[in-house]
Image (spheres, rainbow, N blue to C red):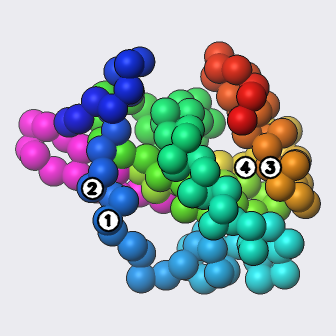
Amino acid sequence: MPSGSPSGLPLGSSVDDCKPAWSAVNGTGPFGAAEDDALTAMSPNVVTFMNNTHRQDLALYALNYGNTLKDLALLDNVSLLSIDAMGAVLELLICCESDDSCVAILERLPWPNEATCTSVDDVVAAFGAMSIGVGLSGDI
């Protein structure tokens, strides 16, 4: 499994080339944003920024705030798929070296303190609070 950061968090690119048949950004699929959600239009910009700049942070969010990931060593890749008023949707590529298999899992992370975000500034503040909660700087 590749390691893509000085901190040793494993990062891969295999999921980046895969696109789901549904779109979490346009409101379809199991974790899609509500169509009337004001953040839906900004979701692609936030997704690109977080995936390009804060991928290691996303891995720590999944480990600390999600229900699926229990060991960073099993994580091959993590990608932010969408944001909406209630939270963020991550795609986790979890691999097991013993049987050389991987599975992609969607993980819905609610914003801290059950907050509802109505603007990009709210989302930045929510990601900042999540970062502080995992021991990182709150600067996003």
Residue 108 numbered mark, or none: none
Q: Residue at x 36, y 45 (%)?
A: 77
| First in sequence: mark 2 vs mark 3 | 2
Instruction: Judge by depth and name the residue closer to the eye, 107 or 14.
Output: 14
Q: Which residue is drawn at 84% across and 81% down?
A: 36
Instruction: Judge by depth and name the residue closer to the eye, 42 or 57.
Output: 42
The residue where tag 4 is placed is 110
| First in sequence: mark 4 vs mark 3 | 4
Residue at mark 4 to residue at mark 3: CA–CA distance: 11 Å
Question: Is 106 contained in the magenta span?
Answer: yes
Amino acid type, mark 4: Pro
Amino acid type, mark 2: Ser
The percent coordinates of residue 21 (x first, y second) are 42, 82
Q: In this view, does 128 lie above or below 124?
A: above
The residue where tag 3 is placed is 123
CA neighbours of label 3 inside 10 A, class few (<14), some (14 to 19), many (20+): many
Q: Tell me if I can see residue 118 in this picture.
A: yes
Whether residue 65 sits left or right of residue 117 in the image: it is left
Mark 1–mark 2 contact, CB under 8 Å?
A: yes
Magenta segment range? 93-108
Q: Which residue is drawn at 44% across and 38% down?
A: 69
Whether residue 19 sits left or right of residue 1 in the image: it is right
